[in-house]
Amino acid sequence: MTAEEKKEIKRAVLDEIKTESNDITEIETVSTLDGLTGLPAMQGKKLVTAPLSLLSKPATDAAVTANSAAVTANSAADTANKAASKANTAASMISPYADCINLAMNGSSARFDGFVEGVIIEYLSVMSIDGVYYDIKNKRFCAKKDGHYYNNWAIGDNTHAASMYLDDGRKIPRKDKIYVCGTNLYVWSDEEGNLVVYGATAQNGVQGTSKNYVYSSPSDKTRTVLSGKLWIYQHGDYNQFLRFKHWGAANDTAETDYSQVQLPNAWTGGTGLLRYDIYRRLDGFKLREQNSTATEVKIVTPIFTTGGTRELIISQATTAKAGVMTAADKTKLDGLSDISAEGARTARALYAAAGDTKLFGPNNIFDTNNLTLGGAVNKGLYDSSIPTEYTKGRPFEVFCTQGIKSGADSKKYMIWFGLRKSMTNIERYSCQQVIGQTEEEFYAYGTPVAFRLNDGKVYTPYKGSGGLDIGTSTQYIVSRECVIPSYSDLHDAATSEKDGLMSASDKAQLDVIAASIDSFGNSITEQAKRIYDLEQCKPLATKSRNGFMSSEDKTQLQGAFADFNARRQAHGVEGYIGKCNVISVPGTVGNTQIAADLYRNAEERDYTPGASFDVYVSAGYDENNPNKQCVWFGLYIEPTLFVRYRLDYWLHGTADTLVGKYLCDTSDKYYEVREGAVGEYIYEASDDTPCIMTIADRRLLNKIKQKLGL
């Protein structure tokens, strides 16, 4: 039989079984177990019937057990009710002692390790800690672990657990407990809202009590024991602090367990201590004049609070207010000294006779040494005039022309001076050289002047709406008799018969004789020889007068130049120390080093002749070359402020280096400013430095001059 045939037979058998079988859904369903004896079931491979009594046995056994348990439970419940009644009775008996029991359970005291202030407390629990601390600002205990602080912790036998210090919420300290830190005891104070020292009471008056003392609470370190150490500490910036030790600290000035309060400095808003720098400025206070002009005086005064200086300007006096005398007024005042008492009396008499006619003294009347005035000329003739050097005493004329004053209207007149050589050729002279005033000063006409011709007529400038001009009409002419007379107008010249004024020519001759007598010498022979030379019109030269050179002077001069040439050749130099490259220093010369920032921040000024100054050296003044140094002149004002003088005065130009110059100090020592790898530096000159004369010779000559009073 083939496999296919076997499969066909198997399918036929299965179909037959299905046809003869009943579906489980077609079996009748009953509503009671009555009459049922069992249920079909499989036991291994066999189909068997299971009695219903076997199916109900577990339930029957459980019911028996449940009934037994119910009896036991009823008995236990009765026993529990009796125990509960006894417990309630015991609880009512111990209720008055609950606080004592809780205190005993939690400990009557707890030790902590110190105080902190305002730390960040993390709301976490830790099982080990480095210590327990009280936060003064947050008013709670906290545990420290590895630099962090926590609000809950449990360690060991819980004697230092958080529950010993804080309530169940871990925020508020337990109030009915004594806390120990070091040798001090602390308790919670509702009045203070913080921990306070146990057993002490705050002093409530200046007298205090006999038993209590002022205490220091963790929240207020400044309330310390009156007998604690107090001292004043000065910081490096000179600010001062009042320091005091905390409660329980050692009675010393060590910088431990202390607090401090800064003592305030005085300022514009309140009183206080005087700062050291202000005291120093007050101690060195002085006023000085600086950079005054011809019309105002400038006084420099220090600024005490911030340093530096401020300037006080005193303006010139006017007819309406007091002030300083101007340079022009001083010149006028000095001119009054040339008028004798007799001349002044005559002037007053003349003024009374002349009414309001202008009067002039000898210092503001200028002789033209000419018969013609000059008068008005056109601008073209002025423009073609030739500027020429004027020598005192030469003739000049007074001209006036429109439109030649810079900054003035073209229609305004201005006076100028010159001398007509032809109709189209005029020499023009400087106003400063003729009358001693600048054009600006003359145009302002603050000092009246007059010009006197050879015929005695006097012409005066007129300042009006048309500018400054000079006319030829009689309103500008004042007769010679109406001018304040000079001393020579009031006294006759001396003659061989009577005393009088010495003429200028007589004075010149007398000076020549006096100078010649100085050179006569001591011996009769020398005097006779000098007199003979004088008579032969061959007077010898002296230090105050030109003349012939003596053979002795010639020999000495030749020797000096020979010595100089020898020195120059020996040292291989062409230059020498002379008056033009020696600078006198009003003090000592050294290598005083000043920081580069002080050099750069120094107040730069022009030097006023005669003012004091010092010599300084600064390295790093050049930011691009920090090792390079320079030599400069300046003046110390205060530790961080210097004045640096421009070198124009000493160098006579715009040069900005002292290299090649020699500095001579008050001890007659000479120093040369040189330049090398480090920049500029100061080198003491040796006595044989090439010079017109050696430094040693120069010193010897200075000593001789001092002894002779030269």
Image (cartoon, grey):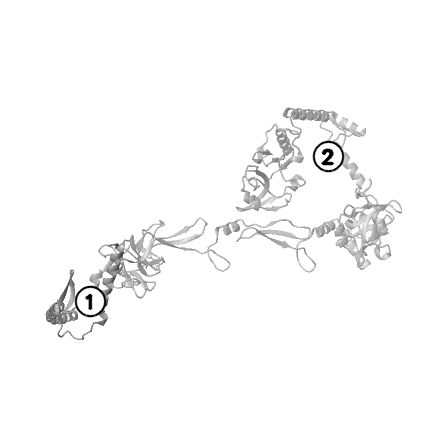
| Mark 1 in CB contact with mark 2 (< 8 angstroms) | no
Q: How many marks?
A: 2
Which quarter of the figure is the N terminus placed in? Answer: bottom left
Q: Using the image as rendered, state which of residue 373 and residue 306 is in the foreground.
A: 306
Residue 31: x and y in percent read: 18, 75
Residue 710 visible in the displayed image: no
Q: Secondary structure at mark 1?
A: helix
Type of the residue with mark 2: Ser
In the image, farthest residue toward the right = 423
Judge the density around disc 2: few (<14), some (14-19), many (≥20) Cα neighbours within 10 Å. few
Type of the residue with mark 1: Ala
Which quarter of the figure is the C terminus placed in? Answer: top right
Q: Which residue is mark 2?
A: 544
Q: Secondary structure at mark 2?
A: loop
Q: Which residue is mark 1?
A: 98
In the image, farthest residue toward the front = 1
Judge the density around disc 1: few (<14), some (14-19), many (≥20) Cα neighbours within 10 Å. few
- Mark found first going from the N terminus, 1 or 2: 1
Residue 139: x and y in percent read: 33, 61
Q: Using the image as rendered, state which of residue 245 and residue 37 is in the foreground.
A: 37
Examine the rendered structure and indicate whether residue 201 appears above or below residue 494.
below
Residue 688 sits in which quadrant? top right
Left or right: 267, with 606 as reference point: left
Q: Residue at x 71, y 52 (%)?
A: 329
Residue 45: x and y in percent read: 16, 60
Mark nearer the viewer, 1 or 2: 1
Residue 251 visible in the displayed image: yes
